[in-house]
Image (spheres, grey):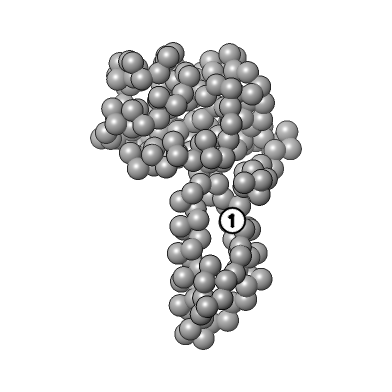
Amino acid sequence: VSRRGLWRHFHVNLLGLFQITNAVTALAAIDALAEKGLKITDKQVAEGLAAARWPGRLEVVGREPLVVLDGAHNLDGCRQLAAALPVYFSWRRLHLIMAITGEKPVKAMLQVLLPEADTAVFTVPHSSRSAPVDPSYLLQQAQGLVEKAGTADSFAAAFEQVKSCAHPEDLICICGSLYLVGEARKLLVPQADSAGIVDLGAEISKAK
């Protein structure tokens, strides 16, 4: 990052190419504040970036198979997710658990994500304030986009369905709705904590 002709190097623990843009924007704001007299050291900036967390954005909450949560709930978010997954992860098979709420471009969202997947299970978040799209409709729209697809009545049922057939080298990605990701976090984050899965995303980001 350049400021007054100087280059500074910082590490961002958050996964996602868009997080680099976010970090640069934050640094530009800090530089502007510094010109107004606010004193923020590079050490403080580095510590702040290292401590930044964004639950539900490329958040890793399981190993063998890898389980990733991402709140991509619109077309742009789906594009960002599709671009980021192969950058940060590798997998034998990719399984998607998806829900979509509200008036969204369903077909376009599925066209972005499903061709990269081997299986997809569509469900509904029960905590949603917006009307969820019927999983049967999502299944219909998914025809020809993914090899194997199905539906489930709840996230817990969808996750059990996917995990029962997943290989340790597979990747399970839960996406499409912030409400779905919220339900998934309630179930999976306590399990991740008890299994000692802490800051795996930071570990992955440092390896890239």
Percent of width and height locating residue 49:
59, 61
Which one is in front, 161 or 84? 84
Foreground residue among 163 and 88: 88
Residue at image point 45% right, 77% down: 32
Return the residue at label 1: 12
Q: Using the rendered view, name the quadrant where residue 25 is placed.
A: bottom left
- Dot 1 surroundings within 10 Å: few (below 14), some, or many (20 or more)? many
Q: Residue furthest bottom?
A: 37
Q: Is residue 101 visible?
A: yes
Q: Residue at x 66, y 30 (%)?
A: 63
- In the picture, residue 77 is in which quadrant? top left
- The kind of residue on which mark 1 rests is Val
Measured as percent of width and height from the top left, residue 143 is found at 33, 15
> What is the x, y in percent for residue 119?
47, 18
Dot 1: element: loop
Please identify the quarter of the rendering in which residue 192 is found. top right
**How many numbered markers are drawn?**
1
Answer above or below: position of 63 versus 207: above
Q: Residue at x 59, y 69 (%)?
A: 8
With 193 as the anchor, is 164 left or right in this view? left
Instruction: Give coordinates of residue 109: x percent, y percent.
Output: 33, 32
Q: Using the image, determine if residue 18 lies above or below residue 99.
A: below
The residue drawn where x is 58% and y is 81% is: 39
Residue 183 in view: no
